[in-house]
Amino acid sequence: ETLTAVICGGGNAAHVMTGLASSRENVDIRVLDVFSDEAERWTKTLGADPLVLTVNHPDGSHDEVRGKPNIITNDASKAVPGASVIIFAVPAFAHESYFEAIKPYLKPNITIVGMPGQPGFEFQCFSILRDIAPECCVVAFEGLPWAARISEFGRAVTVLSTKDFLGCVVIKGKSNVGPDPLKPVQYLLGPHPVAQIYQNFLEPTLNTKSIMHPPIMYGTWHEWDGQPLDSKPLFYQGLTAEAADLMSGMSDELIATAKEISRKKPDVNLDGVGHLFDWFKLVYKDEIKDKSSLLTALRTNSAYNGLLHPMKETADGKFLPDFTYRYMTEDVPFGLVVLKGISEIAGVATPVTDKVLAWSQKMIGKEYIVGDKLCGKDVATSRAPQRYGYKTLDDFDILL
Ligand code: NAD
């Protein structure tokens, strides 16, 4: 039987997913790319050729994978009908446009995949697709399976590394997708990463790493005098003690939120929600030189060597911090704001998160919190549960 799947997007992730999926046997792969004229450009650029993936392996060797999708279109009416799997492979800010595009053509029992999902994916999905989502299978991966860069738009992409394992949330709802809903997704991905299912959507959300970047930005820039710098400061190696303390405090607030949710709803198992420092020591056990504190661990992680602050160059060759970079414009509305919203619904105060959020929102010209309440005007463009009308923990039941 043919597996028909739609890959949504046109960036690095969409290129890789399209190439991998199209290289499998017995598939009908369609690309839906609603951004600007990308679909048209991609179709023209590719012509009759396959997309070529260069897949790097840890031992320094690499493979080439070739695959050609059957169609690349910006028209959901051509891509979605007949598909059993739809994979979003775009940054979180673009999810909304894809939910809207596919909505008229969805049928029960389709599997909708966020790759990655990012905090608030489930709230947004079940709000925009209110009528159909409960009859579909909704899957959200906690990260992207690969690090990847397009080398030639539409034609070639390099997979720099592939994760061994990747956690995901599966909300089967009333869908009838069989005992192993991840089987077609895993088939399209190939052997790695191996998808591992979380207990519920709150577990990866409350464990999210999107709490890392904003406090680092705060630490470096909240007392900045506005003057251009001669060079770009180091992002992790230049971490301030204050930033590490804030990050740690935000992690504590998420653990407190998990505890409170489990107390009020004992069926919701959140034992897996842990502190960022513990996660970090585990994942980078061989890369961290000094594990004595979160501060030293972040500063001495060789995987982060040389990473710089996002900066804009001025006309005279100096540098200004770039607050429009995804560390702020994604990790705040699709990260911190979602977490603040969940804590608020759980009834947990979050003074540390509020401090970072108050500064971050000012830097990106938004208003999410007013004092310690998530009631600012820009909640309406975030993925906070409040935006979608969630008021109590019981409102989460449909997602659990
Ligand atoms: P990307 O920067 O390549 O995405 C760009 C694409 O997004 C564009 O080509 C377009 O198709 C789409 N897009 C841009 N603006 C849009 C708009 N206004 N409306 C609709 N679509 C729009 O992103 P990516 O590298 O593919 O990453 C996807 C996600 O995975 C991101 O959340 C990223 O943070 C995460 N991620 C990426 C990597 C990586 O190595 N590429 C690694 C880890 C995590």
Image (cartoon, grey):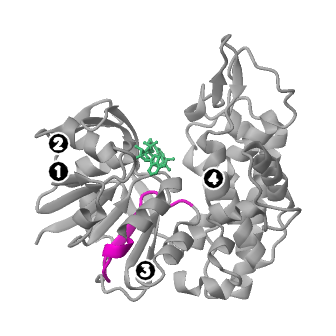
Whether residue 274 is visible here, answered yes or no, is: no
Q: Residues within 10 Å of mark 4 (few under 14, many from 20)?
A: many
The residue where tag 3 is placed is 133
* Disc marking residue 210: 4
Q: Report if the beta carbon of the residue with label 3 is closer than 8 angstroms to ligand 1.
A: no
* Disc marking residue 23: 1
**Residue under the image location 61 percent in, 88 percent down:** 267
Q: Tell me the CA gap for discs 2 and 3.
A: 33 Å
Q: Residues within 10 Å of mark 2 (few under 14, many from 20)?
A: many
Percent x, y of residue 70: 15, 54
Q: Which callout, 1 or 4, points at the residue further toward the start of the chain?
A: 1
The residue where tag 2 is placed is 66
Q: Is residue 313 above or below residue 248?
A: above
**Residue under the image location 62 percent in, 35 percent down:** 301
| Of 254 and 156, the residue lying toward us | 156
Magenta residue span: 103-118
Q: Is residue 87 above or below residue 311?
A: below
